[in-house]
Image: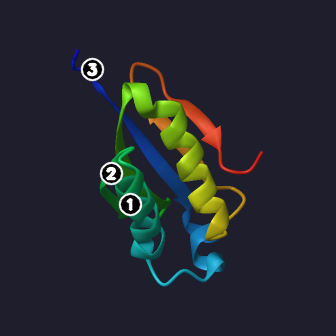
Amino acid sequence: MLETEPIFLEIFITADAFQASGFEGRSAVEDEVDEDLEETGLGEVTGGGSGIYGVNIDIEVEDEDFEAALNLIRETLRRIEVPKSTVIRKRGADIVTYNVYE
């Protein structure tokens, strides 16, 4: 089996939206996403941070699992009702941004 490079994703929630959302902290979102990814074997949360601009959660998935992982992350974020402005960014040579809510 060929080894592929992992894909790095980032969930980003602006500071204002996160504060208004009522989540106790970043871990309230991070733990739900990580649990669902680990349970399905589609990826894992690798870290995150927060600052004056917002909250980010870093995720690593395998290239062949990208579409399934993206769909699962969206479903999880919708289920826990993250703010409508939340986005998922795919990191690489170019940054591609995906909306959580379409």
The residue at 27%/20% (across/down) is 4
The residue at 38%/26% (across/down) is 63
Which residue is more in the foreground, 95 or 99? 99
Residue 16 vertical placement versus 93 (above, below): below
Q: From the viewer's perspective, is 102 left or right of 5?
A: right
Crowd around label 3: few <14 · some 14–19 · many ≥20 (10 Å) = few
Classify the position of the N terminus by image quarter. top left
* CA–CA distance in space, label 3 to label 1: 21 Å
Query: Helix, strand, or loop for circle 1?
Result: helix
Residue 43, quarter of picture? top left
Q: Are marks 1 and 2 in contact (CB under 8 Å)?
A: yes
Residue 82 appears anywhere in the view: no
Residue 70 percent across, percent down from the top left:
54, 41
Residue that label 2 marks:
44
Residue 39 vertical placement versus 82 (above, below): above
Q: Amino acid at mark 2?
A: Glu
Residue 33 appears anywhere in the view: yes
* CA–CA distance in space, label 1 to label 2: 6 Å
Residue that label 3 marks:
4
First reached walking from the N terminus: tag 3 or tag 1: 3
Residue 6, quarter of picture? top left
Residue 44 percent across, percent down from the top left:
32, 51
Residue 46 percent across, percent down from the top left:
27, 52
Q: Amino acid at mark 3?
A: Thr
First reached walking from the N terminus: tag 2 or tag 3: 3
Crowd around label 1: few <14 · some 14–19 · many ≥20 (10 Å) = many
Q: Amino acid at mark 1?
A: Asp
Residue 84 vertical placement versus 8 (above, below): below
Residue that label 1 marks:
34
* CA–CA distance in space, label 2 to label 3: 16 Å
First reached walking from the N terminus: tag 1 or tag 2: 1
Asked which colour scheme the image uses, the reply is rainbow
